[in-house]
């Protein structure tokens, strides 16, 4: 979070206090961290101040929707099709590995039993939509 303060970008949260999610906090935290890092590294290129927002809302009685959005430069149609592919990066040789969003996709869909989608409009921003069950069961060994 210190990196956000130093950058001049802002992040806001809108999460109702009555949403209780029984899941894996470490992996879910990793997904959120990856989304923040991705926005910091890609979305605000050439901008002094960017906005990130995390919201959550219930979906029926057994699911929750978490949205991470930014008002950055957006993602091209071509890149959007590959964004969750391992090693896909637009910053090759500049510190990007192309693994953050791929790892996030696998955590959400495999370990957490959810779905991860992305929408983006160039010049407007990007929104990642995470749908998770409110109760994650342990995987069978």
Image (spheres, rainbow, N blue to C red):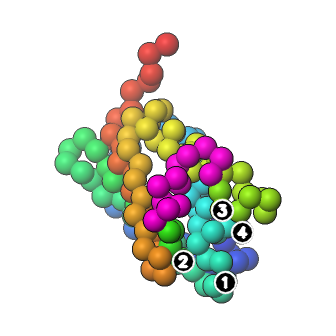
Q: Earlier in the sequence, mark 4 or mark 2?
A: 4
Separation of marks 4 and 3 at Cα, in angstroms? 21 Å
Separation of marks 2 and 1 at Cα, in angstroms? 9 Å
Q: Is residue 134 above or below residue 13?
A: above
Residue visible at 59% across and 67% down in the picture: 39
Q: Label 3, on which residue?
A: 90
Question: Residue 62 colored magenta?
Answer: no
Tag 1: Cα neighbours inside 10 Å, few (<14), some, or many (≥20)? few
Are dots 4 and 1 in contact, CB under 8 Å? no
Question: Residue 81 colored magenta?
Answer: yes
| Residue 81 position within the rendered picture, expressed as x and y whole percent measured from the top left | 47, 55
Residue visible at 28% across and 44% down in the picture: 63
Along the horizontal axis of the image, is 34 left or right of 58?
right
Along the horizontal axis of the image, is 5 left or right of 58?
right
| Residue 106 position within the rendered picture, expressed as x and y whole percent measured from the top left | 51, 38
Q: Which residues are magenta?
A: 77-88
Q: Label 4, on which residue?
A: 3
Are dots 2 and 1 in contact, CB under 8 Å? yes
Separation of marks 1 and 3 at Cα, in angstroms? 15 Å
Quadrant of the rendering where the N terminus is positioned: bottom right
Q: Label 3, secondary structure: give it.
A: loop
Q: Earlier in the sequence, mark 1 or mark 3?
A: 1
Q: Label 2, secondary structure: give it.
A: loop
Q: Label 1, secondary structure: give it.
A: loop
Are dots 3 and 2 in contact, CB under 8 Å? no
Along the horizontal axis of the image, is 141 left or right of 87?
left
Q: Can you tell which mark lies on residue 46?
A: 1
Q: Earlier in the sequence, mark 4 or mark 3?
A: 4
Q: Label 2, on which residue?
A: 73
Query: Toward the viewer: 83 or 36?
Result: 83
């Amino acid at each position: 979070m210190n990196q956000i303060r130093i950058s001049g970008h802002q992040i806001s949260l809108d999460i109702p206090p009555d949403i209780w999610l029984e899941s894996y906090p470490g992996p879910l935290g990793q997904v959120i961290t990856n989304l923040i890092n991705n926005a910091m590294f890609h979305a605000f290129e050439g901008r002094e101040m960017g906005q990130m927002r995390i919201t959550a809302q219930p979906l029926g009685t057994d699911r929750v929707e978490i949205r991470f959005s930014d008002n950055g430069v957006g993602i091209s149609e071509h890149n959007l099709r590959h964004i969750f592919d391992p090693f896909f990066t637009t910053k090759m040789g500049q510190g990007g590995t192309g693994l953050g969003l791929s790892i996030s996709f696998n955590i959400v869909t495999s370990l957490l039993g959810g779905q991860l989608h992305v929408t983006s409009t160039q010049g407007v921003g990007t929104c990642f939509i995470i749908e998770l069950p409110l109760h994650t069961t342990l995987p069978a060994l």
